[in-house]
Image (cartoon, helix red, strand yellow):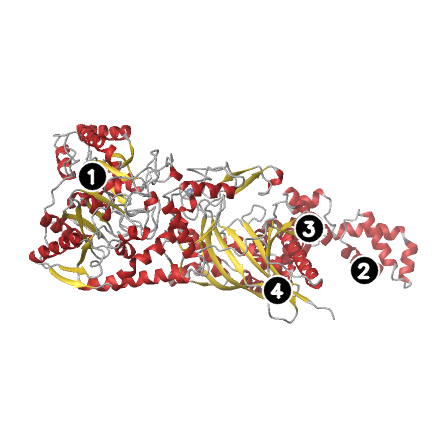
Amino acid sequence: MADLTIEAAGSALAKGELSATELLESVLTRASLTEADLHSFLTIDHEGAMAAATGSDERLRRGEPRGLLEGIPLAVKDNFCTRHLETTCGSQILAGYLPPYDATAVARLRDAGAVLVGKTNCDEFAMGSSTENSAFGPTRNPWNPERVPGGSSGGSAAAVAVGSVLGAFGSDTGGSIRQPAALCGVVGFKPTYGLISRYGLVAFASSLDQIGPFARTVADAVTLFEAVAGYDPLDATSYQGLVPNVRPTLGEGVSGLRVGIVRELGGEGYDAEVAAATSAMVDKLADEGAKVSEVSLPSFEVALSVYYLIAPAECSANLARFDGVRYGLRVPGETVEEMMARTRAEGFGPEVTRRILLGTYALSAGYYDAFYGKAQKVRSLLIAEMATVFEQADVLVSPTSPTTAFELGAKTQDPLAMYLSDVCTIPANLAGTPAISVPIGLDSGGLPIGFQVMAPALGEKVMFQTAAAVEALADFDARPAMAVSP
Amino acid sequence: MTTVWEPVIGIEVHVELSTQSKMFCGCEVTFGGEANTKVCPTCLGLPGALPVANSVAMDWIVRIGLALQCQVSERSVFHRKNYFYADLPKNYQVSQFDLPVCRNGWLDVTVGDETRRIGIERAHMEEDTGKSLHQGNGGRIHTATSTLLDFNRSGVPLVEIVSRPDLRSATEARAYAQDLRNLVAELGVSDARMEAGSIRFDANVSVRPVGTEALGTKVEIKNMNSFRSLERAIASEIDRQVALLEGGQKVRQETRHWDEGAGATHSMRSKEESSDYRYFAEPDLLPLVFAADQVEALRAGLPELPAERRSRLEGLGVAPHTARALAQAEPELRRTFEEAVALGAPPAAAANWVAGELTAATRRLETPAMVDGRSLFRLIEMTEDGRLSSSAAKEVLVEMLRSGDEAEAVATRLDLIQISDTSALEAAVSEVLDSQLEAVERYRSGEQKVLGFLVGLVMKSTGGKADPKLVNQILRQRLG
Ligand SMILES: [Zn+2]
């Protein structure tokens, strides 16, 4: 049962062939068998999940209207605020923190009848590409526990891959959904900026952060997206128009679609097997009637540098509130300033500290123009370039990440090497455009390879249409060895 | 040769808007109340909470800007101002930097007979901080044993209005501050109560030799909680700077705290060498767009402003000096004037009463009591028809404020109504003339000053209530 798709489970639940409680017990069993190896969860809320599942079963018995995710066990990354349920963002500074409110996305999931199983592990404050920056220990890759699951939403990706939940949510600031989805062999989707409310998502870099789903199929990702997307008056950057209706065109294939291969996302630094799998998929798309051409976006070459100025700058302000005054960790000091300084020094891990310092520096008087100011200009240039390219192509494709899952510890001493893991995913965050990663196969080491589809802002329809075609062409149905039905 | 020094003063004003809800969340704006009861995730800076701009506050800052003759920016941006302070929940304040809502305005300020146009550099929108309540050892942060935090004020909309350094004396600075306060009160966008902290003034003061262009070193002074202390603090700071410079010393750039008791400013913890607030555009809020028609609609909704009012009053025949005072007077006083005139009181007389005695009396009494237009009209009527002398009328006015009674009742109670009934006075005059035959003779033989003596006797016999003008008139007639 833990290996069901959301679609299949939803239909079985609706018909009464399966109860939400049984489904929950099944995924909890899966989690209990795998968590010791994976550590994909920071919190499993047995009591709350059981209450939600029981409630869902009662609603079915009483014949009440059913939500879109009625009885479906899900997880959210630990940077989503959950009312009275510990929310740490993978950081010591928030250890034990119980938010007084639910993030809008969480509230909408509950309203849709979902069963919230728990909170998944992540890099501290979503900063990282391997989930090794979690203050509570890393998550491991279900395909090979010696490998990282990617990050920062590595816990969500691993939990979905192994069947501890049927779907999950993460946040994607520079690839934090798509890259772990690729490394764990699941679908991961970052919507257009503003389509899913950020209210209650603990901010890393506000202009880049976007919530999105993990699922085992493209269709399930659509369902999860539909359950939470749409205008939220509590988020001023939330999109006020209609959410693109993507479902009707999911199965229409790629015939006639203009598919652009991004020249800058390939070559040196890319695994040969990743490159080969990507080209093979492009060929298949062409065989299906897609008009494939190579496109060039020169600003992609500097996207990583731009990102590593803008994201740290925003994070330096966003994380300033963690000062020991009102909540979270407090390390005493002789004065208020000393208390704040000690709290932050002890509470934040090295990567978070590095980015706060980087961002503070980039915003400082005398450096602003050279760093942050310039980065914003290049960001505008990149957005303009993408708009131009999207006049020639309906979607852009690339590998999701240059490599498959790397070994734990391989890049922890070399931040730049780690940052390169997100080189393909970062442009969509800078531009606020939608992008999805779909698994297309395994490399010779048995590790999943992800294929990225990007579309213009609010172009979810054509993006999902292409992603569904990729999924069908890849016919990827391998499961990690850990995901054995008990 | 001694140098003559010219003060150069700029004023920064913080106005708390009295909107129903806070700037970026739905919490109620209240003053006082139990600590931390008007708070939510957003104004407490809890993880994950986001701001949404209050559209009423945005309209109100445009009203303020328009009343100050500012240009309203078509596009304006919120910035984050980063600094760590325990009562600043996010450790950054959502404020504005290079794209404020309003720019380049002015306010005419009159001191004595001189009216000067004071430039307004900008008016921008920001959020207020919480309040630190330092416990023990005098309530100052560096001596406190502990600090309590109240976030009820956190996120209250705040408009900062920055003048150009156009003010040239402490008196002028005070006049500017008062006029600005009255303007804001009149717009109905703030309680504008200085003692409650809903309007706060900081001054930037420097001095330079008269006739020079370059600005001297600027000192910021804070903690003035009345217009009087604002004026005193600036005057004291000017004296301090002049004394330093004349003694061959330099003025240090710093922030100084006004100590009301000591009547002097003293140095606050020397401000961080140069505070770098690392401003950047607030990514959680979209840029603000003010369409021309929206701005024009707000302009059309503005009340009559002091400059317009002044010329209207002069047109009604009110003396220029009085018109100026009345145009700037508190709204309650002006309402009394307008009502009295509407009932038929002569505008010049009503203006004199309101700008003169009524203003003085309300200030003296230090109570919020006010005489309404109808009561003032009746008082003026009694003076016009001779039933009250001008000195008695002043006394009656004070008692009206104190008791809330009408002029007639007060005058009767205080026994101040003049006898202006001719027949009653004729009798009193006859009585005096009959008993003063010798004085009558002297008057008739040309001793004019005897008249005053006789008037005095009539006044005495009527207990001072006779209308002296009328007595005079009757006596002259009778003495032929
Ligand atoms: Zn609030």
Residue B251 appears anywhere in the view: yes
Q: Output the chain of dot 1.
A: A
Q: Amino acid at mark 3?
A: Gly
On the same chain: label 4 and label 2?
A: yes
Q: Output the chain of dot 3.
A: B
Where residue A145 appears, x then y in whole percent? Answer: 22, 39
Q: Output the chain of dot 4.
A: B
Residue under label 4, please give it.
B216
Residue under label 1, please give it.
A142
Q: Residues within 10 Å of mark 2 (few under 14, many from 20)?
A: few
Alpha carbon separation for disc pair 4 and 1:
69 Å
- As helix, strand or loop, the secondary structure at mark 2 comes to helix
Residue A239 appears anywhere in the view: no
Alpha carbon separation for disc pair 2 and 1:
123 Å
Alpha carbon separation for disc pair 3 and 2:
63 Å
- As helix, strand or loop, the secondary structure at mark 4 comes to loop
Q: Answer yes or no: do the residues labelled 3 and 1 have beta carbons within 8 Å?
A: no
Q: Quadrant of ligand 1?
A: top left
Where residue B468 appears, x then y in whole percent? Answer: 78, 55
The answer to which of marks 3 and 2 sits earlier in the sequence is 3
Alpha carbon separation for disc pair 4 and 3:
23 Å
Where residue B75 is drawn, which disc sits there?
Answer: none
Return the residue nearer the eye: B208 or B291.
Answer: B208
Q: Output the chain of dot 2.
A: B
Where residue A477 appears, x then y in whole percent? Answer: 11, 42
Q: Residue at x 9, y 46 (%)?
A: A475
Q: Residues within 10 Å of mark 3 (few under 14, many from 20)?
A: few
